[in-house]
Amino acid sequence: MQSVNIKAVIDANNDVADNRVKWSIDDPQLITLAKNDDEETDGYSSQSASLAVNLSSSFFQTIIADAEKKQADENFQYKIPNTIYGAGHQNGGVAVLTAQTRPSTSFEGKPCAANSRINVTFQIIDNTLVATEGAVLDKQVLTYTVKRTLTGDRINPQETVTVTVPQPLTATFTPDFFSKDEVVWTSSDPAVVQVTQDNEAYREASVSVLKDAAWIRNIIATDNGIKSNDPYAKVSGRGSRAVVITADGKDKLGNKASAVCQVTINFVTDDQTRVVPEGIIMDQTELSYNLGYQMAGDIHSQIADKKGFTAKKLSATVLPDLDDTTGHKPYDRTVIWTSSDPEALSVDQQGNVIPVEGAAWINKACYKTPYQGEKNVVITATTRDGKKAASCLVKLSFQAECLEADRNSETFDLALTKTGRRNNPTYTWSGMEAKKFSASVYSENNGKKIQWRSSDSGILSVDSEGNVKAVVINETGSNCWLDQ
């Protein structure tokens, strides 16, 4: 603001003897009129008027006060408008400067006067800025989970890695209309957690976790090391990391406000795999049974004894043959036992094998000499998981031990003939010829000897060769069986 000098020039035609004038201003509050050095006590001076704007005038102060009040009422969110106040624009801002000569030196005592209109315009140029005073995030804590899921066969698992979806963060600055220079979002460890900001919506950011970060790969590598030593081991690698997300808001005045969010990343392994049977072996691949009935007599007689119908134990081992530890579970080692002919040979679910008494094939063997038979049955052990199978051939042989004669009955027709004198006859027997019997032994032991005996040796005699003949006590016919 510089002073303005205005000079009064008196026209010679005005017939004024003295060129000194008195200066006056009609609004001394707006315009200040400086006192000249040569100014006399009556106020006349030959020098120019020196004018200055009075910034303390009500014209300025009222405008400033009203503008600042309105700005404060609006919480300093907006700049003061650059409105032009004063002459030609708003009320006020006009003053009149007057120069007047001395009446005593003027023609006919009439002073000459001249006026100058002083126009004052005023404009507030608001170049102020709004400082940032603070910042806060809508979330102070975020938690993410990276899960490695293993399914299927433990030695050849299917792997999937999932991670919590990116989560948004919103920054609120105080005041939110601060004069922004820049807003920067940062991660304390971008190799673990990344933050992406929207250049347009600078208050918004998206936080995401890298599922293949080095620290996660290291945990997986440790689990893989365990698997290299024991391919059937269950793994459970886990770990966690902490990262800080920071939002920095910097204003154009050089101030900065920051807010942080603590981010926790948890890595877990969900091993849902199972040990799958790869095979099965049996302790025996072939088994034999020698079965038999000991008959009381012939094949139609009662069974005096049975042999060989006892249980035998088969065992199966599911492969791989692992220790029964938690690290090797789940592992379904259940074995299902089956018989190819359960009516001939039964097997329970513990692998106990036992021939079936009275089975059809045994009964068939007893219908026809030599009363023996053979049958092969396959016992199979199958894993419930994977249907791996192993089998054992069971050979069954049967022999019914009995003794059978070549015939069931025989008749001796004996005749006693008397000849000569009646009181002293001659006796002659007919039909007394011996008859040969034969017998067959059906037994596993073909060396058994046959022993012959008669149930009444007084009637029939039999020798060791099976020759049978009637017994005659004497030739007079006076033997007991004839008497009877």
Image: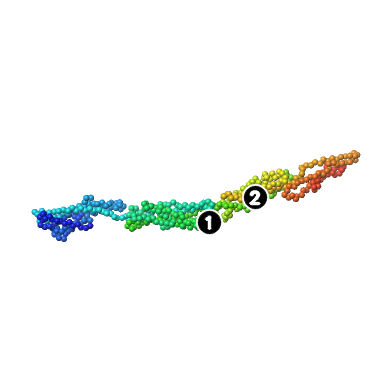
Few, some or many residues within 10 Å of mark 2 (<14, 14–19, 20+): some
Q: Secondary structure beneath disc 2?
A: strand
Residue located farthest toward the front when viewing the structure as drawn: 12
Q: In this view, does 343 lie to the left or right of 123?
A: right
Tell which of 409 and 372 is nearer to you: 372
Q: In this view, does 211 lie to the left or right of 380?
A: left
Residue 261 image label: none
Residue located farthest toward the left when viewing the structure as drawn: 108
Few, some or many residues within 10 Å of mark 1 (<14, 14–19, 20+): some
Can you give x and y, in whole percent of width and height, for residue 435 in the image?
81, 44
Q: What residue type is labelled 2?
A: Leu
Q: Secondary structure beneath disc 1?
A: helix
Which of disc 2 and disc 1 is earlier in sequence? 1
Residue corresponding to mark 1:
227
Residue located farthest toward the top when viewing the structure as drawn: 422
Q: Is residue 443 left or right of residue 188?
A: right
Tell which of 212 and 404 is nearer to you: 212
Residue 203 appears anywhere in the view:
no
Can you give x and y, in whole percent of width and height, for residue 277 in the image?
57, 52
**Separation of disc 1 and disc 2 at Cα?**
38 Å
Tell me the quarter of the picture where residue 412 sits: top right
Residue 213 against residue 419 in the figure, above or below: below
Point 79% across, 46% down: residue: 466
Can you give x and y, in whole percent of width and height, for residue 388 in the image?
58, 50
Q: What residue type is labelled 1?
A: Lys
Residue corresponding to mark 2:
393
Tell which of 477 and 465 is nearer to you: 465
Can you give x and y, in whole percent of width and height, for residue 428 in the image?
87, 41
Residue 166 appears anywhere in the view:
yes
Q: Locate the C terminus by quadrant.
A: top right
